[in-house]
Image (cartoon, grey):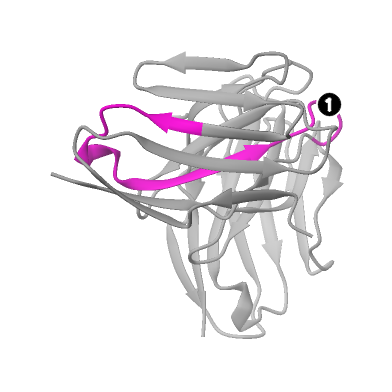
Amino acid sequence: ETGVTQSPTHLIKTRGQQVTLRCSSQSGHNTVSWYQQALGQGPQFIFQYYREEENGRGNFPPRFSGLQFPNYSSELNVNALELDDSALYLCASSLAGVFGNTIYFGEGSWLTVV
Amino acid sequence: QQQVKQSPQSLIVQKGGISIINCAYENTAFDYFPWYQQFPGKGPALLIAIRPDVSEKKEGRFTISFNKSAKQFSLHIMDSQPGDSATYFCAAVTQGGSEKLVFGKGTKLTVNP
């Protein structure tokens, strides 16, 4: 077990709706990243939060946003859902500044947009 | 632009055989190269990782070989078992900064009994 928990595990939304996905990081980890994994593809970096501030963003539009809370838990919000947003959303936690740092993934949240 | 190229896309090996997955990268700023194993319906799990100042790292049946000059690295799975059947992803990251993992597209490994 990685100590990274995500919720919900599965959900179905309608195009145009909004969704919030949640992540609880491994104890002691101050960095959380979110990845999108489309079926049959490798995970793609969405963004990262370090000490509640966004610390890097991948090639995703602004309707993908996030939050990190003081207890290092995190949320991923996606507005105006599109069919192509259907994917596995992965949360990863790590401890910044430690070389060879291990990045741990949660089990993911499966989002289906219909 | 795909920064990490992985091959083959799929691989079938007999039980007891050697599975070899190859990756190549472009960005010389990468300084940490992990491999992840993913079973269907699960998140990626760290398998083994290497730094570019090391040419080989072995953990049990899993070995990473690293060629810095060629910007290539590979995963060898010795004595492959049916339980190793999964999708394997190589990745690369620049430590410090946003520490964004850049993944290959994955290799689906099937080990036949």
State the residue at coordinates (19%, 38%).
Answer: B15
Number of numbered callouts drawn: 1
Q: Is residue B79 magenta?
A: yes
Location of residue A27 in the rendering, given as x and y in whole percent from the top left corner: 57, 22
State the residue at coordinates (47%, 57%).
Answer: B9
Residue furthest front in the image = B70
**Relative to residue A103, is residue B23 depicted above or below?**
below
What is the crowding at mark 1: few (fewer than 14 residues within 10 Å), some, or many (at least 20)?
few
**Relative to residue A43, is residue A82 depicted above or below?**
below
Location of residue A30 in the rendering, given as x and y in whole percent from the top left corner: 72, 26
Pick the front one: A113 or A68: A113
Q: Which residues are magenta?
A: B75-98
- Determine whether, in the image, residue B18 is placed left or right of residue A91: left
Location of residue A5 in the rendering, given as x and y in whole percent from the top left corner: 48, 40
Pick the front one: A35 or B70: B70
- Determine whether, in the image, residue A85 is placed left or right of residue A52: left
Q: Quadrant of the C terminus of chain B?
A: top left
State the residue at coordinates (48%, 64%).
Answer: A40
Q: Is residue A88 magenta?
A: no
State the residue at coordinates (79%, 60%).
Answer: B1
**Could you say whether the residue bearing mark 1 is in a helix, strand or loop?**
loop
Find disc 1 in the rendering and name its residue: B96
